[in-house]
Amino acid sequence: MEFNNLVRIVGDEPVFETSLLLAGNVDPADVRRQLSRWTKAGRLYQFRRGLYALAPPFQKVKPHPFLIANRMVRGSYVSCQSALAYYGLIPEYVPVVVSVTTVRPAHWETPLGIFEFRHIKTELLRGSRLIDLDGGQRAFVALPEKALLDLIYLHPAADAPDYVRELRLQNLEHLNLSELQRLADFTRSPKLKRAAKVVVELAHVEAKEYERV
């Protein structure tokens, strides 16, 4: 396969998998060798085994980190600090894209960012939505309320009021407090129920302070 043929086949896809190139009368081993060579030459980015993107100047669409994360581990969704920062609920820039998954945890450092996958129970893998990103891309991202609960679930003693305050949550008026409590109740986790109560109290305090301004 010539590199120009690869560019033609991939087209406007932000990321692509090896399987896209294996249709027809091709030698899978030869395709993989070529992909390896093009990656070493800087023409391709490799995110994990079998998942690639064209590198500039061949790249037509820059892949969004959230889309990459979704494709790296199927069935996962972006959550925790990454989703909270996306929604403007925490002030910090988050250099790592954090997702949750029911498979084993993983950590990848790639040319386009660092990706971390945290394990949660199957029954907790809910509360995400498909959102529109830059360039017509789409990815599954936790609801704001679920992103906060996932973060608390994954950290020891995160239901303590001091921990919740240290998150420096902001723009709490954008949180659906009823949904937060509903999701916490669904988990049947005393820890998440306590945390939801702390967040609701903080939101009420913030609302009163805003009214006084």
Image (cartoon, rainbow, N blue to C red):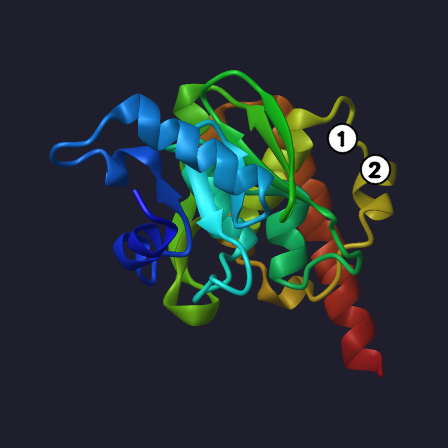
Q: Residue 108 is drawn in which quadrant? A: top right
Residue drawn where x is 58% and y is 29% of the image = 117
Q: Is residue 131 left or right of residue 151?
A: left
User: Which residue is nearer to you in this view: 47 or 179?
Assistant: 47
Give the secondary structure at mark 2. helix
User: Which residue is nearer to you in this view: 101 or 198?
Assistant: 101
Residue drawn where x is 52% and y is 16% of the image = 104
**What amino acid is labelled 1 in the image?**
Ala
Residue drawn where x is 59% and y is 51% of the image = 83
User: Which residue is nearer to you in this view: 156 or 202?
Assistant: 156
Rendered view: 210 above or below 64: below
Q: Residue 22 is drawn in which quadrant? A: top left
Give the secondary structure at mark 1. loop
Q: Residue furthest top?
A: 104
Rendered view: 115 above or below 178: above
**What amino acid is labelled 2 in the image?**
Tyr
- What residue is disc 1 on? 158
Q: Residue 92 is drawn in which quadrant? A: bottom right
- What residue is disc 2 on? 163
Circles 2 and 1 in contact, beta carbons < 8 Å? yes
Q: Position of residue 119 (x, y in %)?
A: 55, 22
